[in-house]
Amino acid sequence: MNIHSEKILIIDFGSQTTQLIARRIREQKVYCEIHPYYTDLAKIKELKPSGLILSGGPRSVYDKGAPTCAPGLFDLDLPILGICYGAQLMVQEMGGVVEKADKREFGKSVLDIISPDGLFAGLDRDKQECQVWMSHGDRIDKLPDHFLAAAQSEHSPYAAIRHESRPLVGVQFHPEVVHTLIGTDILRNFLFNICNCHPTWTMGSFIDTTVAAIRQKVGRDQVICALSGGVDSAVTAALIHRAIGDQLTCIYVNNGLMRTNETASLLQFFADTTHLKVIDIDAVDYFLTELEGVIDPELKRKKIGYGFIKIFEEEAKKLGDVKYLAQGTLYPDVIESIALDGGTVIKSHHNVGGLPDIMQLDLIEPLRELFKDEVRLVGLELGLPDEAVFRQPFPGPGLGIRIMGEVDRLRLDILRQADVIVLEEMKTSGWYQKVWQSFAVLLPIQTVGVMGDERTYENVIALRCVDSLDAMTADWSKLPYELIGRISNRIINEVRGVNRVVFDVSSKPPSTIEWE
């Protein structure tokens, strides 16, 4: 559903901060999308971008097999900003030279601005020596014809470059990270002075254009919406309901992988606070049978995704002439479910990589271009209550991917009891709204313990709490020791079958938020 008249395309060469570039662009109220480096020229032209950003990456441009861009990219009449690897690629492709640096630059560096215009226009005089963040072992050694140095650092004579007449610019540092103090100024100059974009992409404008696009696409057809009670599906349902009203029927599937009492409370919430038509499907036995003996996390996700689609299509047939299935797919789901050339998928999200090819319904995914915090803003704009908008994220596959190993009723019961304690203590302490997610994970191991002077050999629960903005990156939450201790003590004492609790102190990357 490509409905944005102005957009920036970010061409991804594998940088860990590519998603951060997208965040920074959208903060300026300009829409942007991330596409893999092997996107062909025809696709780029079809998207009609206002400008391109070439991301950084872990490789050297002169390595054999190093990722490159579509042939003819630099012949397009488009503004292009190259960042680190992207700048080096621009130089090499246009006839310059990139070589291994005698002295690498990692971390803070001081930038000396030579050309106070273009990317550096409007900066105060006292900012002409500025802190930036470098992360490279190569450097630009010789510029292509018609390129000029725009800034330099101690070890990079071409820390920023520009074409003398075309809107082609590059920086050797990373303007998207907070350690580059003028990073926002540089990106704003690229967006508004070089690409001539306008700060018009707001959640209000997103709702207006999306509602119009849904009406045009659906016409008088019927739509069913996968409703889980999470913020993504709730906002999806509200957005589509605004567009087509009673043509929408929501379907809630109890797959047996929900938290304690969650099904009943969710259905009560929808009945009390919305005007949506909701069908409740009990599919516990079906899903647990499908998951018998399944240990591989990718297979789990795909079996759960297939099960949802099977049920949705069965219900669609009962309702009559239903053509569309709506679901709350977000941009991070899409990014994680697609591999760069030669790479691997991080994980198949049940609503992206988990969808079977035989699905008969056409998809409507109005949030597919949004990050989680943007979805929350859309929810508020649509008038959804805070309790729906600010719920912590809960994965579509539910507790199935918080149980390492086989999923069965006994292990689900153990995890549910532990999960209740985690949520109760997080809410009582006031930490529930301070963190992005907080949950329990049941590990596939048992350990020795002592309870009542007797030896035990029982399960281990991991406590996972993270801080994040959009789930693309995350850091473990620095909970008070007293709170961690209280959660651990309650789980060990109140949940039969658990004798040990551990606390996950991993960030994303390299870990993911969910364990599977």
Image (spheres, rainbow, N blue to C red):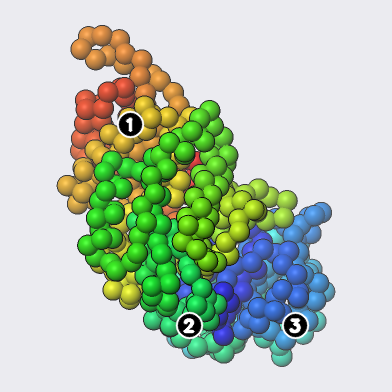
Q: Nearer the viewer, residue 98 or 230?
A: 230
Q: Nearer the viewer, residue 204 or 56?
A: 204
| Amino acid under disc 3 | Leu
| Amino acid under disc 1 | Asp
Let me know if residue 475 appears in the view: no
Residue 37 location (% of width, % of height): 70, 64
Q: Which residue is mark 2?
A: 212
Question: 10 Å neighbourhood of mark 3: few (<14), some, or many (≥20)?
Answer: few
Drawn side of residue 262 relative to residue 27, left or right: left
Q: Secondary structure at mark 2?
A: helix
Rendered residue at 31%/13% (across/down): 456
- Cα distance between the residues tagged 2 and 3: 32 Å
Specify the quadrant of the image occupied by residue 434: bottom left
Q: Which residue is mark 3?
A: 76
Residue 405 location (% of width, % of height): 49, 30
Q: Secondary structure at mark 3?
A: loop
Q: Which mark is residue 413?
A: 1
Residue 313 location (% of width, % of height): 53, 55
Q: Is residue 138 above or below residue 302?
A: below
